[in-house]
Amino acid sequence: MMELRSTLTCPKCGGASTETMPTDACQFFYDCKHCGEVLRPLQGDCCVFCSYADVACPPIQEARRTGAASSCCSS
């Protein structure tokens, strides 16, 4: 089952916010609701959820579930 809610944790202030992940696009930017820091994916990650959240984005979840290569953001 695909999880669509994930908790992002800001690396600057440690604030955590639970958000709904988009299923049709990658989220490259996220404004921390606690300190205002603009989060961007770490090098090698496709989105802020893969870098800072407790649940990876839907395309990565699907790739892990099926064993297929990830197609996140590569279409």
Image (cartoon, grey):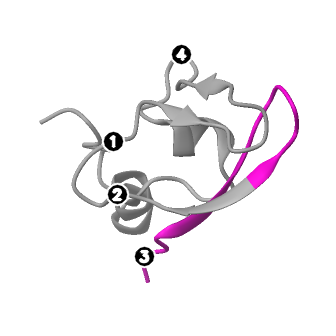
**Span of residues in magenta:** 1-16
Residue name at image x 76 percent, y 37 percent: 10
Looking at marks 4 and 2 on the same chain, the residue that comes earlier in the sequence is marked by 2
Q: Position of residue 55 (x, y in %)?
A: 60, 59
Q: Is residue 5 magenta?
A: yes
Q: Is residue 38 above or below residue 33?
A: above
Residue 43's label in the rendered image is: 4
Q: CA distance from mark 1 to mark 4?
A: 15 Å
Q: CA distance from mark 1 to mark 3?
A: 16 Å
Q: Position of residue 20 (x, y in %)?
A: 48, 65
Residue 2's label in the rendered image is: 3
Image-based side of 75 in relation to 61, left or right: left
Q: Quadrant of the N terminus?
A: bottom left
Kindly identify which residue carries mark 1: 26
Give the SS element for disc 4. Answer: loop
Give the SS element for disc 2. Answer: loop
